[in-house]
Image (cartoon, helix red, strand yellow):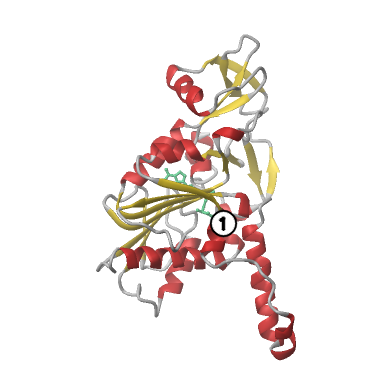
Amino acid sequence: MQHALYGPEGFFTGPASGPADHFRTSVHASPLFAGALLRLIEAVDARLGRPPVLQVVDVGAGRGELLAALAASTAGTPLAGRVRFTGVELAPRPAGLPDAIAWRSGIPSAIEGVLLATEWLDNVPLDVAEIDSDGRARRLLVDLVTGAESLGADVNPADRFWLARWWPGAGLGDRVEIGWPRDVVWADAVAAVRRGCALAVDYGHLRGARPAFGTLTGFRDGREVDPVPDGSCDVTAHVALDSAAAAGGTPYRIMTQRAALRALGVDGARPPLDLARTDPAGYLRALGAAGAAAELTDPAGLGGHWWLLHEVGIELRGTI
Ligand SMILES: C[S@@+](CC[C@H](N)C(=O)[O-])C[C@H]1O[C@@H](n2cnc3c(N)ncnc32)[C@H](O)[C@@H]1O
């Protein structure tokens, strides 16, 4: 997975196109998503007492789409002139990104502000294991040419330790996705925030409802495909959000995207019919926004994604 996604010919870091060409994240679904995050950023800024510099760091920034949308919306707000946007990416800086947005490959330290990670953790490589007839968790091997799968050696003690705590109860033929590599990178990301918050938005599951056969899958050109790790497709697995949360080492809250966006004012309600008579163009605009909001908050789709929020030295209740 590491080589297939981030190697020289990797899906994300090779010469191929950007993530937006292959799948639709909340960032691409609608500017309402960036608008909601802007409200969160403004709330963090206010709780921090409007510092001279407020940092907004997007980890796994893709082609910088979210940062560009945020940067464009801060003009004329109290954030203008004080907010610094930074994209953290393994992929090179995209052409045409506004100069005001910094781009780097590692997470800066001592962040005062907001660290965002939308659909990053699901792309952090992990190993998959299957429980064999002796009840042993065996590493799943994949033939890079044919995609054929076979069982390899037993998982190692670190894997077993994680599975016992975070993915208990797997039985014969079940597949488990060993999530500690995500916990490690998320703990580092949260630790980089000195004051403010860290927010991961991703699809995932909690301990009470791990999927018996795992979630490993592939995406190419907007279609789900076999997750062959040969660099030709995205390879992704849902995130064990509660495990990452606990690894963060600070207080946290986990909520659905639907609940989070509603708290931030994105609700998908249709505009009043009266508006169609008094302001037909305004009605159509409002209808379009309602449709986009409905997509972002649909419990069976993007609205079912999880928001993992760590508040560091501030308290955001009342806003979210
Ligand atoms: C699914 S894309 C998400 C892009 C964007 N955040 C969005 O929501 O549309 C995941 C991105 O994370 C990046 N990525 C993965 N591991 C990373 C790491 N350790 N540091 C920085 N970027 C990373 C990949 O290169 C890829 O562009």
Q: Identify residue type, mark 1.
A: Ala
Q: Residue at x 52, y 46 (%)?
A: 12
**SS type, badge 1:** helix
Total labels: the figure holds: 1
Residue 241 drawn at (x, y percent): 50, 40
In this view, the residue in front, 8 or 304, is 304
Q: Residue at x 62, y 53 (%)?
A: 302
Residue 227 drawn at (x, y percent): 64, 35
Q: Quadrant of residue 278?
A: bottom right
Q: Is residue 15 above or below residue 147?
A: below
Residue 217 visible in the shown view: yes
- Residue ranking furthest to the bottom: 278
Q: Is residue 171 above or below residue 218?
A: above
In this view, the residue in front, 295 or 272, is 272
Left of 310 or right of it: where is 32?
right
Residue 206 drawn at (x, y percent): 55, 37
Q: Which residue is mark 1?
A: 259
Q: Residue at x 41, y 41 (%)?
A: 186
